[in-house]
Image: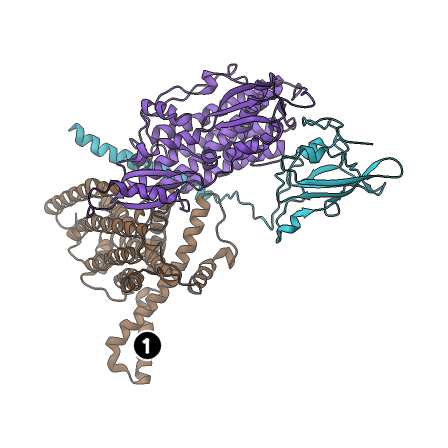
Chain colours: A brown, B purple, C cyan
Amino acid sequence: MLSGENIVKSVSDLLHQLYAMVGLSAFKGVLDPIVAAHVMFGFISVFVMFLVWMERKVSAHMQSRIGPNRVGIFGLLQTVADAIKLTIKEDIKPVHRDKIPYYIAPIIAFVATFAGMVVIPFDKGMVVQDLNIGLLYIIAITSFTVIAILSAGWSSNNKFALLGGFRSAAQIVSYEVPLVLSLVPVIMMTGTLRLGGIVEYQSQNHWFVLYQFIAFFIFITSATAEANRAPFDIPEAESELIGGFHTEYSGVKFAMFFLGEYIAVIVSSAVAVTVFLGGWLPPFAFLAFVPGFIWFMIKLLLVIYLVMAFRWTFPRLRVDQLMDFGWKVLIPVAILNILVTGFCVLFFGKGV
Amino acid sequence: MTDLLLSQIKVNDESQFGTDDYVVNLGPQHPATHGVLRLIVKLDGETVKETIPVLGYLHRSIEKICENRTYPQCITYTDRVDYVSAMSVNLAFALATERLMGLEAPPRAQWLRMIFVELQRLASHLLWMGAFAGDIGALTPFLYGLRERERILDLFEMTCGQRLTYNYIRIGGVMIDILPEFVPKCRAFLDYFEPKIAEYEDLLTYNPIFLERTKGVGVITPEVGINAGVCGPSLRGSGVSCDVRKQQPYLFYDQVKFNECLETAGDCWSRYKVRMRELRESVSLIRQCLDRLEPGPIETKLPPVLKAPPASEIYSRIESSRGEMGIYLVGDGTVKPWKCKYRCASFNNTYVLDQLTRGWKIADIMAVLGSLDMIVPEVDR
Amino acid sequence: MGAVGHYFSSIVMGFWNLVIGLSVTTKYFLRMKTNTQQYPEERLPLPERSRSMIKLIYDGEKDQFNCVACMMCAKACPNSCIKLEGVRQPDGKRRVTTFKLDFSTCIFCGYCVEACGFDALTFVSEEYENSVYQRGSLLQDEQAMKWVRPAHLTPKTEEPAKVAAPAGATAGA
């Protein structure tokens, strides 16, 4: 049967034979993660290109336009063309930049979000490394982007970029709290931080979105804010701050910020799918013949569509209202949700 | 001029070691400013301490050009004063000249003028709605607004051959009669358009983020508004009745039924509401005008040489899409105006920008600027 | 309790209005109906009255321009972008010899076409791609503006000369 576990098993068998042929079997433990990371990198690069295309198509059809349709069928290769354009573009640098942070910032922005992908289970057993603190790891590693954005804003020696950097620092620090708080009830119910374990729990019960509807929406909202997406895109608010923190970046460096933003969307949507929408599980038992990773991708695209629809429908919040919304609405509601869940777990037992 | 302004900024320093302001230039090249308006904004963190609008980047001295052209030739330049509602400025100049010379357009021409000016008001408000929503961060209403605006421009192009600079409303009438298929097409457009207004309202009016951004922001109190000469929908949002169509009816505005849209709060949301309600009012106005359109001549017989009476002057005003559009003309017995002055709504509306944004956040500058509906060529002329 | 109730009801109402907004955009997304006109491939016919390009009408049967160089168009032009000269022919009628229109200053107001009393100038709607690579090529002469009226188009019957310029100010036929 075609399933993620079988694919991973056959591929790793093949790899181990390859190691044996070149006599590297002793380094199996080191080489396996490296290969897996490279596979993940390739997958993510292609997927981000697809997402950029999808975002442009979704926004176009929402606005009764056509969107890209020139390069490739349905314009699918448009993003490839854009990527080529960005790489061969002149790299314009501000003269009075602060050199080291200026160069490091895009790298951190990309790496920090990409590292989050490592623990996402696409199917049963189809995961680079199913850490037992997976959820905590994702939250910790993705919040590194704030350093990237702050240093980008500081080092480009531009007033708008600096404002964008500070806005971003305030925003990401604030929204980290409801993000974590919205995940706490799930952890309370499952008793594990391992993403695979959370999905397995859901396979025995219902999906968490049925129990934790409020937590799901708090998570989606804060994740959108974490990824600096509209309506929470104040660090790069075009109508106020031109480009915000990436005003002074061009070429490949800009592409890395861009990539980082999309990977952040993928990571947070993937966490939402894994934690609240049952990960690789089919919606009904009789649909189980469809491989799990296909279900995962369908759910992932639906969540990403939702995030895109947010961006193209809603206006942008102001910086102080953004803080108000985070601290005065999301956090109290999330805490209340934890309280109610705690009582439920206490009285009705772990299985709800 | 720039250096002068920048030197003024530093005057407030109390001591040599005092903190300096964080000064940013919004414009003339900035993705959000309308046209080439430049705002020097003094910030304290995110909070705005002062906003200094710098005008003149689009100054084309249209008033002076008009003093060197004959009266009919001036009409082509009025198109360029406010390119988003060129018909209104056409009408303003044509009416001023007619009043100066004691002419009057035949009834059919007047009805046609009303139809086109109200259609132009729809087009202008649609573009405004899109730009305002775009300033606040919602990008989709802009496309929806332009989509409907294109259909209005199609109606204009069908009639007079141009989409932006019409030169349609002439002294003593209109340029050319409408085609027979215009009336059914216009009705079809109105039927198509009316449900769309509800759609824009669904997208924006009660959207909590939109409410947060606009409610209570940039309040123009009636006193401030009247003292600064704010006019049009921006002042009607403060509850001051200032619609020239009601106060001093021109054309046949006294023969049709319409309401002056008034809101009381005076904030950005009220100004938005006024304009959205004006869309509906304009639709009903156009329907009434189409009903009462009767065949007849479309222009009065003009004298072969159009000369103003010697030592004559006139101030004539109409309600353009942005507010009171006044034309002051002084004739000296020749074919050219001796003095031509445009009183544009946007110029006065820009005047209150500093008062409205002081103490608010930098993002509110965009919301307030958008809600005032300013067009830079109208400010600079 | 009122404040707490208001707090929660405002959250719920705000959420509901967000859903209404999302439903509008999703409706358009699912409908997949576009209003785009893909220009170089799709070309909409412009309305007949479209003021796209000014042409000098050439009478193929008589092998001459209709223009009699009465200078009405040059007088009506707000930007003085029309320059023309004419000479008296042996049959006693004036004919245009050189006609220059500078399209870089022309604003397509239509006064010249309206002022023309001899059916010599016209707007054409089919030629609207007026961009050029050199500014100099915008200065068109009578050969560039030559246009023979197709058989299916009849001359305009409405009376011209709505512009308040002195009638018959220059020598005509």
Position of A184 compared to B292: left or right? left
The correct choice, above or below, for A203 with respect to B35 in the image is below
Q: Residue pushed farthest left?
A: A346
Could you tell me which residue is drawn at 50 percent across and 20 percent down? B315
Closest to the observer, B255 or C160: C160
Residue B175 is situated, as x and y percent measured from the top left of the image, at 64, 28
Image quadrant occupied by the N terminus of chain A: bottom left
Q: Residues within 10 Å of mark 1 (few under 14, many from 20)?
A: some
Q: Chain of mark 1?
A: A
| Mark 1: amino acid | Leu
The correct choice, above or below, for B356 with respect to A307 in the image is above
Closest to the observer, C12 or A344: C12
Q: Is residue A310 visible?
A: no
Residue C85 is situated, as x and y percent measured from the top left of the image, at 76, 40
Q: Quadrant of residue B239?
A: top left
Residue C36 is situated, as x and y percent measured from the top left of the image, at 53, 45
Mark 1, residue position: A15
Q: Is residue A126 visible?
A: yes
Position of C161 compared to B193: left or right? right
Residue B90 is situated, as x and y percent measured from the top left of the image, at 56, 28
The correct choice, above or below, for C18 with respect to A68 in the image is above
Looking at the rendered structure, the secondary structure element under dot 1 is: helix
The number of numbered badges drawn on the structure is: 1
Closest to the observer, C65 or A212: C65
